Image (cartoon, grey):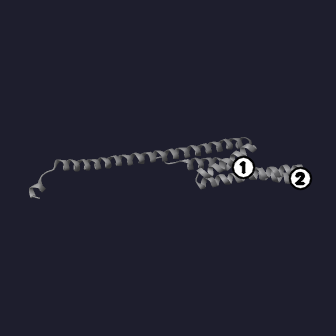
Amino acid sequence: MSVQALCTWDWQASATLTTGILAVGAALWVGKKQTGIQRRQIQLAENDLKIQLLDRRFDCIERIRQIRSAYVGSSTLSVEQIVEFFEVIRLAELIFPVAAVDNLRRVSAQLAQVEHFRRMGDAAQSRHDETARQQAITQENESAMAILDALPSLVDELVIAAKIDIA
């Protein structure tokens, strides 16, 4: 082979090489765009999950507000309302931070005490034990007052805990 044969320009080889380089460049550009689209889709999916969580949290808070309104109005709850309150606590355990749920559990324990003292008073009344009945009523009222004192701050704490940063 001569030097001249080695130094001649082959347009076909040059076109093939240029086409290959352009194809790689285009593939890199398309890949970068697709990666950007996938990142955006992931961000949108994360935001959608955050919004769903926020909706569930505010639904939970609204149910607690309704129970609180019923309790403040009558200082007692129906069996259905008590069951709903415990259902709300179970839901809150899944969607709220531990600190907010702990306060909710304390209120539920106080509610259980109110119901316990109410039953004790009813039993004392059926036995005609007025002293035991008065003690039960006093303890029931103390527990009820503790609940009434705790409920407003509890809802406020849940509202603060419900906030989610959606970027």
Q: Residue at x 68, y 54 (%)?
A: 106
Q: x, y (%) of residue 4?
A: 9, 55
- Name the image quarter holding the N terminus: bottom left
- Write down the quadrant of residue 65 in the picture: top right
Q: Residue at x 70, y 51 (%)?
A: 108
Q: Residue furthest right?
A: 128
Q: CA distance from mark 1 to mark 2?
A: 24 Å
Q: Is residue 27 left or right of residue 67?
A: left
Q: Is residue 77 visible?
A: no
Query: Circle 2 is placed at which residue position?
Result: 129
Q: Could you tell me the amino acid type at mark 2?
A: Asp
Q: x, y (%) of residue 56?
A: 58, 44
6 vs 59: above or below = below
Q: Nearer the viewer, residue 115 or 13?
A: 13
Q: Residue at x 68, y 43 (%)?
A: 67
Query: Circle 1 is placed at which residue position?
Result: 145
